[in-house]
Amino acid sequence: MNKLGFIVHPINAASFNEYFIFKNIISRVLSERSCGDLIKYLPTYRLCGIPNIRSVKGMATCADIVLVPLLPKHIAVMQEEKVLKKIEDGIKICKKNGCGIVGLGALISVVGNEGEALSRRVDIPITSGNTLTASLTLDGIYKAAYAMGVSLSESTVAVIGATGDIGSICTKVLSKKARKLNIAARNEQKLNGFADVVRQHGSADIEVFKYTKDAVKGADIVLCAASAMTTIIDPASLKPGAIVCDVAIPPNIAKEVALYRNDILFFEGGLAKLPYPNDITGKAVKELFPKDSIYGCIAETMALALEGRFESYSIGRGNITEEKMSEIKSMAGRHGITIADFCCGNRALTARDIENIKLNAKNKMETYYAAKR
Ligand SMILES: NC(=O)c1ccc[n+]([C@@H]2O[C@H](COP(=O)([O-])OP(=O)(O)OC[C@H]3O[C@@H](n4cnc5c(N)ncnc54)[C@H](OP(=O)(O)O)[C@@H]3O)[C@@H](O)[C@H]2O)c1
């Protein structure tokens, strides 16, 4: 059986109302706030399925999507054991339904060291999906730099959440390509230790930042990969013409950023597209993903299922290598799963949008440099 399971959690109370089967009843009786507080008492349940996910090679797989009813704030403050138990219940539902591998979406993988603790509790392969996500993230940055006419070798790149699973491999790879890296995370000791490792890895200058707002100031490219519970980047701190790739779920920067800053290229990173995008059918499934794309973490799980590689592929923080990124990218590519188009708040960015961003950036640049003098 090449079926896959995928575990998700609601990003906020409003999105949970959308997913919840008794949505009409609950929203009539309860306010959004009290609904948000009660969610955590619900059991894990199967949310929906994707019946036919086709590969360009002619084979197909299908998926069960299981929802762990915990908001980011619950995942952050609840006892880890209670969160792991709810996720374990979800993995068991997938196994009972015949899945051969289970992917862990968004913050689900962050708990218990990127699936490591869970892999000891269940007898089915699991993956955080972070290897393909990181590969898609880096490819998105290269594509955006090309589109904006930004040379990576002359750029300062800020990585927020640099010590994380996705952030750390992206930092290592970028240290061989960028001029300077501004790295940030909350745990300063860990960040300083990691900075020393990266200095051995590549040629970029590495500067460590305690505060996110200082790290992004003046950066040409910003990679947001922090597992923060709310937005942590103020759009006002960004330089005109900056490229911002936000891979975090929930996002590190409000998706409405384009409303305030028409001079920066903001896009959601780590997204893939299927060879047959219409395979994503059904309201509940569509609401989970940005328009015409899927998250890298489920894309990795799909690629593994289509390849018949039922193994725990991305497990444990800090284990992603460049070799593994190329391997999973090739696997996904064989089945026609590739990088998604630039997407911002459910809107695809066109070549014309990018030209406008470049023009707006050029106009604002003069004022920006005058203010700095
Ligand atoms: N788009 C996709 O397909 C996809 C796939 C998988 C994961 N994700 C998302 O990607 C993000 C990163 O995942 P991961 O697995 O790499 O997480 P991770 O290993 O837990 O790393 C998170 C990083 O963020 C830092 N961090 C956490 N809170 C922060 C804050 N408030 N301010 C600054 N830094 C903070 C952490 O360091 P400190 O604790 O020291 O601050 C760490 O460096 C998550 O939001 C996850 O949901 C997206």
Image: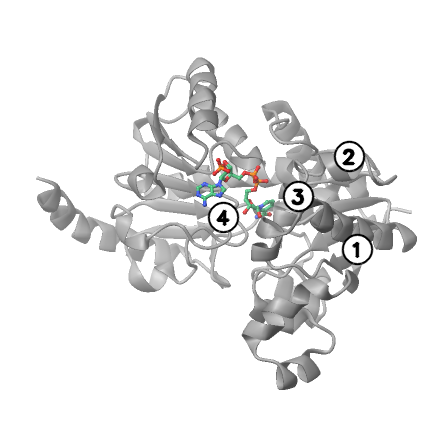
CA gap between label 1 and label 4 equals 28 Å
Kind of residue at badge 2: Ser
At a point 67% along the width and 80% down the height, the residue shown is: 26
Q: Is mark 4 within 8 Å of ligand 1?
A: yes
CA gap between label 3 and label 4 equals 14 Å
Q: Is mark 3 within 8 Å of ligand 1?
A: yes
Dot in front, 1 or 2 = 2
At a point 65% along the width and 69% down the height, the residue shown is: 38
Q: Dot 1 corresponds to which residue? A: 63
Q: Position of residue 224 (x, y in %)?
A: 45, 43
Label located before the other in sequence (2 or 3): 3
Residue 373 higher or lower than 192, as above or below: below
Kind of residue at badge 4: Ala
Kind of residue at badge 3: Ser
Residue 68 occupies quadrant: bottom right
Dot in front, 2 or 3 = 3
Dot in front, 2 or 4 = 4
Q: Residue furthest front?
A: 79
At a point 79% along the width and 36% down the height, the residue shown is: 119
Callout 3 secondary element: helix
Q: Position of residue 243 (x, y in %)?
A: 36, 45
CA gap between label 2 and label 3 equals 13 Å
CA gap between label 2 and label 4 equals 25 Å
Label located before the other in sequence (2 or 4): 4
Q: Dot 2 corresponds to which residue? A: 312
Residue 336 visible in the current orientation = no
Q: Dot 3 corresponds to which residue? A: 109
Callout 2 secondary element: loop
Q: Dot 4 corresponds to which residue? A: 228
